Amino acid sequence: MSSFIGVIAVAVCVACWELPGLIKRKRRKEIFLFIALLLIGTGLYGALTLHAKIPNPFLLIKAVFDPIMS
Amino acid sequence: MSKSISKDNGKISARQFMILIILCTIGDSILILPTIIAAASKQDAWITMLISMAMGIGVGALYGWLAMRMQGTNLIAFVQQSLGNAVGSLVSIVFIVYFVYLHITLTSEMSQFMTTQLMPETPNNAIFILFISVVIIAYRLGVEAFARMGELLFPFFMLLFIFMVVLLIPQVEVDKLQPIMANGMLPIIKGVPTAFAIPFTELIVILMLVPHLSGEKKPLKPFLIGTSIGGLFLFITVLICLLVLGANLMETKYYPTFILAQKITVGNFLERMEAILTFMWIITVYFKTLLIFFALTKSLEQLFRLKESKMLTVPLAMILLVGSVVSTPNIVIYNEMIKHYWSMFDLTV
C-alpha cells in the first residue's frame, strides 16, 4: 500500500511541476495529453504495486505471429 | 503541411549523427545477438553476420535515401505528408506502438542482464527507474547535449572494444570455425532475419533525428558509414565469440560476450574484465534506448501537433516501466520471445 501511495505522490508532484507552466503558456492540447498519459501511467503503475494482473504486451505479438509461424 | 512543430531546434553535425547511428546499430545486439545467431547457424554464425551486415548497409542506404527525401522533416511528418492526414496518422500510430515495444524490450534486456549477471539482489524496478531517469534527463537537455555525449563516449567505447579483442587474441582457436557450411546454406540463412532485424531495421528511429541534422543535409553518407562501422563491430564480436568460445558454448549461454570478457587473463594479474563489457554495453544500450525514447516522444508531439513535448517524458516513462516489468517476468520467457517472434515483428513493421 505504501508503494501505491508513493506512486500517487510522484504523479501529484509531476503534475504540480509541469502544469503551472503549461497553463501559463495556454497549451491546451499539451495539458490534455499530459493529464491523459499521467492518468494511464499512474493507473498502470498503481495496479502494478497492488499486484493486479496486467496483461503482457508481448502476448499481442505472439497472438499475431503464432498463426504465421505455424 | 506537416512540418515539425516543435521549437526544439537543436542541431547536430553529420559526425555526431553518424556516431549515434553506430551506437544505435550496436545497441543491445553486442550482448544478445551472438547467442541467437549461434542457435540458428552454429559455427557458421560469422557468415550469417557477414550477410546481415551487407543487408544492413543496404538498409542504411535506404534510410539515407529516405532521409534525403524527407527534406528536413521527421519520419512521422513525412509519413503524414506522403500518405495524407488520415492514413498517415494511422501509420504513425503503428510506428508509435512499435517504438513502445522497442523501448520495452531494451529496458527489459537491461534489467534482465543486471539482475542475472551483476546485481541479483536488486529489484527490477530500481534498475528501470534509474535507467529511465537518465534517459529522461538526456531527452530534456536536448538533442545537442546527447549527441555531444555520444561523441564523447564513442572513443572510450572503441578503445575498450579494441582492448577486449586484443586481450582475447591469445585464446583464439581457428579450429572452432570448422567445419564451414557443413549443413549447407540453410542454417546460415535461418539466422539472417534476426541478425539483420535487431541491429539494422530498428535504425528507423534515427529518421526522427533528421530535422536536427545541420549543414548541407546529406544524411546518406552518415547512414552508410554508420551501418558499416556498427555492422563491423558486431561481426568482430560474433567472430571472436566463435573463435574463443565455440558454437556450442555460445549457443547455450545467455550472454556469450559477457563470458568472453570473463575469459580474459593476462599473466596472473589482469583477469575478469567483464566490467569493460558491461560499460561498453551500457553505453550502447543507453543510446539506443534514448533514441527510441526520443523517437517515441517526438512522434507523439508530431501526431498531436504539440508545441512542446518535455512534459510527456515522466508519464511516458511510467507507462514504459510497467510494460517492461509485465512483459518479462523472467529471462526464459524473454529469450523465447526474442528468439521466435521479435525478428518477424521487426521486419513486418
Image (cartoon, coloured by chain):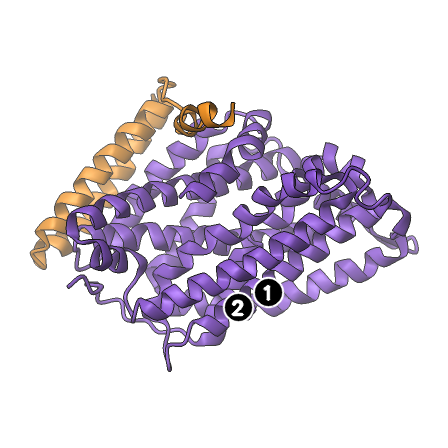
Chain colours: A orange, B purple
Chain under callout 1 = B
Residue on which the image places disc 2:
B224
Asked whether B25 or B283 is in front, the reply is B25
**Residue at the image position 79 percent from the left and 42 percent from the top:** B43
Q: Of the residues shown, which amino acid type is indicated by label 1? A: Ser
Within 10 Å of the Cα at label 1, are there few (<14), some (14-19), or many (20+) other Cα atoms? many
Tell me the SS state at disc 1.
helix
Discs 2 and 1 share one subunit: yes
Q: Of the residues shown, which amino acid type is indicated by label 2? A: Leu
In which quarter of the view is residue A9 placed?
A: top left
Looking at the rendered image, the quarter that the C terminus of chain B falls into is top left
Asked if the residue under mark 1 is in contact with the one under mark 2, i.e. CB atoms within 8 Å, the reply is yes
Asked whether B118 or B341 is in front, the reply is B341
Residue B152 lies left or right of residue A50; in this view the side is right
Within 10 Å of the Cα at label 2, are there few (<14), some (14-19), or many (20+) other Cα atoms? many
Looking at the rendered image, the quarter that the N terminus of chain B falls into is bottom left
Residue B161 location (% of width, % of height): 70, 61
Residue B299 location (% of width, % of height): 28, 52
Chain under callout 2 = B
Residue on which the image places disc 1:
B228
